[in-house]
Amino acid sequence: MTPHIKSNMKETEEKSSLNDYHRERNKKAVLAVEKMKNRPYSLEEMKEQTTRILSTVSPEERGIVLEIGGESGGIRIFKKRIKTKSVFIYQHNETNLGETDLSVYKTGKYESFELAFQEIINSFQLDVLYISSIDFSYTNFVADELVKRLNSSKMSADNFKNKLRFEEVLKIKFEFDAVENKWKKRIEGIDQLIGEARKFQIGDETQSYLHSYPYFTNYFANIQNHKIEIDNLVIGIHFVYGWMPTIFEFKNQEDFVVATEILNKAKVGEPLKSKDYKTLKRLLNGSLVGTSKLLHFINPEKYAIWDSRVHNYLRKNLESHKFSYDIGDISNYERYLNYLSEVTNSVEFSEIYSLVNEKIENKFKYKISSFRAIELLMFINGKK
């Protein structure tokens, strides 16, 4: 293949996400025109109506995982699937973002979000940029990078002008520690979790669950050859339904083979996609709760139990994260896992974990995972 052809292919791939964006907007524009056929509009009304409908194209529909600036220009990172893997497209066009001059159109393709974001770090002063939207999977990384930049530039508390905007979009608080003379991030709800951990007691309602729990996790940890087969899956499903008020019915046995492949990925810590959760949910009688329990028994360090109490806790105490009302919404579960990762990676988590794990270990003689410690607090304190 000649260099010229390779260059053209690369350019086509890098512009494909931008084309997807325009494709979605064109669909919306057609809908706008069809609506306007029903009654006469003035030219100004047509412009206003079309702008309103086009604004409903969400970042997710466009494949955008990070957007800085407005509709007329700015910085975007797209996540795009090319052949068998995901890539990240960095793109900015000509505009002016406050004190930062974006005078040259630039685009590039990267293997990870972190590498694509490095373009922003290398080119711009991060704290003055106006962040519009971000995929929740990358909020913790961006927050960490922002704190690094604030501290390396010795930014004072008064000079961080976009603090409120970053907090609103990232759902993370930023505090200036006057004693240590540095910026720190403060995760929403962390103080409440610390308080709940200090009051944590093993009640009667959790005794049975806590007694049976290690037998379920040990079963999957000790599977021969460390590979989950269909018989392991069937046994695991009945572990799950022993913790649920309904009886499992074999309705989608054709999913068993695909499900074992997904569960083996989960067992080794490989991240699952939304479609993987959908397959498992379909197999487990349409239950995301049952799916989460099975995943947790298989890999308690990476997957947490999700139920109505946890769901209620998050909706009540983390309003800015906007967990939807539907307990079966897979995006809720993905947000939940992301939040748990933020909490367990925080400085404050060591206190939370030691307070909860110590009582479990003293009474039942086993240690729990980090995710399990937080989930237990949410379960106990998530009653309606």
Image (cartoon, rainbow, N blue to C red):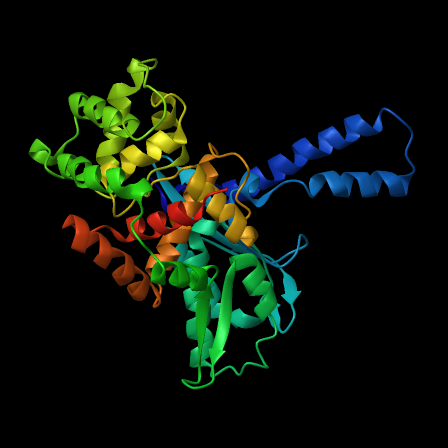
Residue 364 visible within the image: yes
Residue 325, located in which quarter of the rendered image? top right
* Residue 241 against residue 88 in the figure, above or below: above
* Residue 362 against residue 322 in the figure, above or below: below
Residue 353 is situated, as x and y percent measured from the top left of the image, at: 28, 59
Horizontal relation, residue 340 to residue 156: left or right: left
Horizontal relation, residue 326 to residue 364: left or right: right
- Foreground residue, 1 or 217? 217
Residue 12 is situated, as x and y percent measured from the top left of the image, at: 48, 41
Residue at 17%, 41% in the rendered image: 214
- Foreground residue, 266 or 350? 350
Residue 34, located in which quarter of the rendered image? top right
Residue 102 visible within the image: no
Horizontal relation, residue 72 to residue 357: left or right: right
For the image shown, how many numbered marks are present on the structure? 0
Horizontal relation, residue 129 to residue 83: left or right: right
* Residue 8 against residue 223 in the figure, above or below: below
Residue 358 is situated, as x and y percent measured from the top left of the image, at: 22, 59
Q: Residue furthest left?
A: 224
Residue 350 is situated, as x and y percent measured from the top left of the image, at: 29, 65
* Residue 291 against residue 15 in the figure, above or below: above
Residue 27, located in which quarter of the rendered image? top right
